[in-house]
Image (cartoon, rainbow, N blue to C red):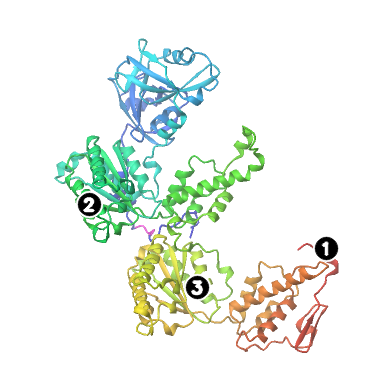
């Protein structure tokens, strides 16, 4: 459910004033930026100079800086550079102005925070090596040094930093260069006697872009609390080991991250390594295994030795369940030896070695328990499926370089992508962009070497492109279970107004107004049982309430859970509930509940009591559901007397709702809802039909309407002359008579369909009823012989 501002409410989060302020949450304290006078907001420069930054005179005075001073400016991903500071009266006190080239060197964007430090002891450089970027010198002739570098460095005593890029405008175009080497230090000032070398092969743009796209904390969204935990356990020991020494505890040795594929476990490990500047050693689980005796253990030992030599270091073991399964369940001797070797290596790490082991898996319960104790993997962190706020963060990260149309509403997309993980959202954005390109393909000639600039400029991803991508994709973590956000609304369901109201109070209110339940100290209901005759809309109601809550909908057919293997049926139940909790808010719909929830002990011929065990598992899962997870269970049956009483007690399926056969107003509503998208003649009297169908269920009425439409289509296709394709009164009445004669509604229908009077049935000219049989000559509208279908 999206509120009036287009923002989704947090799952299980109350909005009352007594809630703790998230800015004072100690669990995320490490993520908060500490205010300081030298931390300033990045603004765009007015003068395009790669060696200059500008500050307001008041800020310069506060930081005790003078015009022309050289300062060190620190950005993200442990990047920094040296610049000359100048005063700018138009610059705000809280901002620093730097150009785009410097921003790229610091890996920052407009609005980011940088810190500024005096750098008085920077030395003059003896020698620097500079090389151009290959794509900026295509077609450039002449001596690069004379045309570009000499005028650039002669103008001023420019400070430079090794590995920085800078742009020089000269001749007919701008050329980009990179500082490859500096002597005597990484920072120096290029003076009159500094030697400048520019010999060597140009640097490939792809190599530079790979460096530019190094992952940092800003590239990870949707797991704020988990990131805070990981930074506490990794960054603090690597950067400030004295903290642990002074308080008298040992720093953590290892972190185990678990969660569905695509949530960003490997990405987090790389981001931590880049941001801390630590040596990163990646071990892919399956790659370390070898058929040679002792080689697998040797590979592990080499990895730990290499990390200790290059400390501070992070060892990241991806898919750790492949090399450290439970020893009692493995048949191979190699796996057992590898697990033992890993345990020995983690125990043997020196307390102050500045090495942290991180591991990732999506099967935490298959890892050997000895690895999961304190002193080895100290902390286990669940990198779960993101909530709407997390998905919005991820969407903003993936669309920050995309050209979006004004109609794109990222908050709405975040609300509609239940169950999507980071990789799914990346795929969604990519598919939306591809769809935009497909729409412009008629303007693009594949044979041409270039594309018109106007075509390139017109490319912008629209909301319709995202809508298409949403239809073409589904969440990868939940593909094994059919999870859908239904499109059925209350308008699709005729009648049942009291049932709708009761459902809204039971299901919708806890999702939309959790604060009210907290205020009254009341826990919301966990489930509802629909019972009543077949075809009265029990499944449709479950889908509609899921759609109204903007919740996922998992439909579980009872017999599908049962298998012939011992214990597998219960495992299926467990997996379904796990998926539902991961995709919360979620409505689980058990159709034909009586097939898996029969009264225990009554299952004659039930091999091994599988039905009883499945029911026990369902009862256990429902009791273990967390109120904050917003998982709601709806069961449907037309045999409520067969269901075990333990399932129907308060706290499980709290409410029993009878879905009756529709009364006359409800039947009229159902007919209107069913025919609202069909072309219908003016002579169709739905009130008469509603009155004539006493005892019909909703499914029966839908079938009448569908058959009437089929009859109209048949007439349209079989006639040589064209007529209007409209559902007429006689189509519907003919089919009512047919259904009655077939005894579909328990022979309770007394229809006025066998009368010989044309006026009673309001039949059009050309339709004659004879006795109990009807001879139908289709109605022809001569004035519309050429009407289009």
Looking at the rendering, the stretch of residues picked out in magenta corresponds to: 13-17
**Helix, strand or loop for disc 2:** helix
Q: Residue at x 26, y 52 (%)?
A: 334
State which tag comes first along the sequence, 3 or 2: 2
Which residue in the protein does label 2 denote?
337
Percent x, y of residue 546: 48, 66
Of residues 286 and 137, which is closer to you in this image?
Answer: 286
Mark number for residue 786?
A: 1
Of residues 424 and 22, which is closer to you in this image?
Answer: 424
Mark number for residue 501?
A: 3
Furthest residue toward top = 193
Is 721 a magenta residue?
no
**Helix, strand or loop for disc 3:** helix
Of residues 755 and 140, which is closer to you in this image?
Answer: 140
Mark number for residue 192?
A: none
Mark pair 2, 1: CA separation: 83 Å
Q: Are marks 2 and 1 in contact (CB under 8 Å)?
A: no
Q: Is residue 712 left or right of residue 537?
A: right
């Amino acid at each position: 459910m999206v509120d009036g501002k287009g923002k989704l409410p947090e799952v299980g989060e109350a909005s009352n004033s007594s809630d703790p302020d998230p800015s004072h949450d100690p669990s995320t304290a490490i993520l908060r930026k500490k205010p300081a006078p030298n931390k300033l907001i990045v603004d765009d420069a007015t003068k395009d100079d790669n060696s200059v930054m500008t500050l307001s005179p008041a800020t310069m005075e506060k930081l005790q800086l003078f015009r022309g001073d050289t300062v060190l400016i620190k950005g993200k991903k442990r990047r920094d550079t040296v610049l000359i500071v100048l005063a700018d009266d138009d610059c705000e006190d809280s901002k620093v102005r730097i150009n785009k080239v410097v921003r790229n060197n610091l890996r920052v964007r407009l609005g980011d925070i940088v810190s500024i430090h005096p750098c008085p002891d920077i030395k003059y450089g003896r020698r620097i090596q500079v090389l151009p970027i290959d794509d900026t010198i295509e077609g450039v002739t002449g001596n690069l040094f004379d045309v570009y570098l000499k005028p650039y460095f002669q103008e001023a005593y420019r400070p430079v930093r090794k590995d920085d890029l800078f742009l020089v405008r000269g001749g007919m175009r701008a050329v980009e260069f990179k500082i490859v080497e500096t002597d005597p230090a990484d920072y120096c000032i290029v003076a009159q006697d500094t030697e400048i070398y520019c010999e060597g092969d140009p640097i490939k743009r792809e190599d530079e872009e790979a460096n530019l796209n190094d992952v940092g904390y800003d590239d990870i969204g949707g797991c704020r609390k988990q990131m805070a935990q990981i930074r506490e356990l990794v960054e603090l020991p690597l950067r400030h080991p004295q903290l642990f020494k002074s308080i008298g505890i040992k720093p953590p040795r290892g972190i185990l991250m678990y969660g569905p594929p695509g949530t960003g476990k490997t990405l987090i490990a790389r981001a931590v390594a880049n941001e801390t500047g630590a040596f990163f050693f990646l071990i892919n689980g399956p790659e370390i295994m070898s058929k040679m005796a002792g080689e697998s253990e040797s590979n592990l030992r080499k990895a730990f030795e290499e990390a200790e030599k290059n400390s501070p270091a992070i060892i990241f073991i991806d898919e750790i369940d492949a090399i450290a399964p439970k020893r009692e369940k493995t048949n191979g001797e190699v796996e057992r030896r590898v697990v033992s070797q890993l345990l020995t290596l983690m125990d043997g790490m020196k307390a102050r070695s500045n090495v942290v082991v991180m591991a990732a898996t999506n099967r935490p319960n298959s890892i050997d328990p000895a690895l999961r104790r304190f002193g080895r993997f100290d902390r286990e962190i669940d990198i779960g499926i993101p909530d709407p706020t997390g998905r919005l963060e991820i969407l903003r990260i993936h669309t920050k370089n995309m050209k979006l149309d004004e109609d794109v509403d990222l908050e709405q997309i975040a609300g509609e992508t239940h169950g999507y993980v980071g990789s799914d959202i990346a795929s969604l954005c990519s598919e939306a962009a591809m769809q935009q390109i497909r729409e412009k393909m008629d303007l693009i000639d594949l044979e041409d070497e270039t594309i018109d600039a106007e075509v390139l400029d017109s490319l912008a991803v629209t909301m319709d492109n995202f809508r298409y991508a949403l239809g073409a994709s589904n969440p990868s973590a939940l593909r094994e279970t059919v999870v859908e956000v239904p499109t059925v609304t209350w308008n699709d369901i005729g009648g049942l107004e009291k049932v709708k109201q009761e459902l809204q109070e039971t299901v919708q209110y806890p999702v939309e107004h959790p604060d009210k339940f907290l205020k009254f100290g009341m826990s919301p209901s966990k489930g509802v049982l629909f019972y009543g005759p077949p075809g009265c809309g029990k499944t449709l109601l479950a889908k509609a309430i899921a759609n109204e809550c903007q919740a996922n909908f998992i439909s579980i057919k009872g017999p599908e859970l049962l298998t012939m293997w011992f214990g597998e049926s219960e495992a299926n139940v467990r997996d379904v509930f796990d998926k539902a909790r991961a995709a919360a808010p979620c409505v689980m719909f058990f159709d034909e509940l009586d097939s898996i929830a029969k009264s225990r002990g009554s299952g004659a011929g039930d091999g091994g009591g599988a039905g009883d065990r499945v029911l026990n598992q369902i009862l256990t899962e429902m009791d273990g559901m967390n109120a904050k997870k917003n998982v709601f269970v709806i069961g449907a049956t037309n045999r409520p007397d067969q269901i075990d009483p333990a399932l129907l007690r308060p706290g499980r399926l709290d409410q029993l709702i009878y879905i009756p056969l529709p009364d006359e107003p409800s039947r009229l509503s159902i007919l209107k809802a069913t025919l609202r998208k069909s072309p219908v003649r003016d002579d169709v009297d739905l009130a008469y039909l509603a009155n004539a169908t006493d005892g019909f269920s909703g499914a029966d009425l839908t079938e009448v309407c569908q058959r009437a439409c089929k009859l109209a289509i048949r007439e349209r296709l079989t006639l040589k002359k064209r007529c209007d394709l409209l559902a007429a009164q006689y189509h519907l009445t003919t089919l009512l008579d047919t259904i009655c004669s077939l005894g579909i509604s328990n022979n309770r229908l007394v229809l006025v369909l066998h009368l010989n009077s044309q006026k009673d049935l309001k039949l059009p000219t050309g339709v004659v009823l004879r006795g109990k049989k009807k001879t139908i000559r289709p109605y022809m509208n001569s004035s519309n012989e050429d009407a289009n279908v």
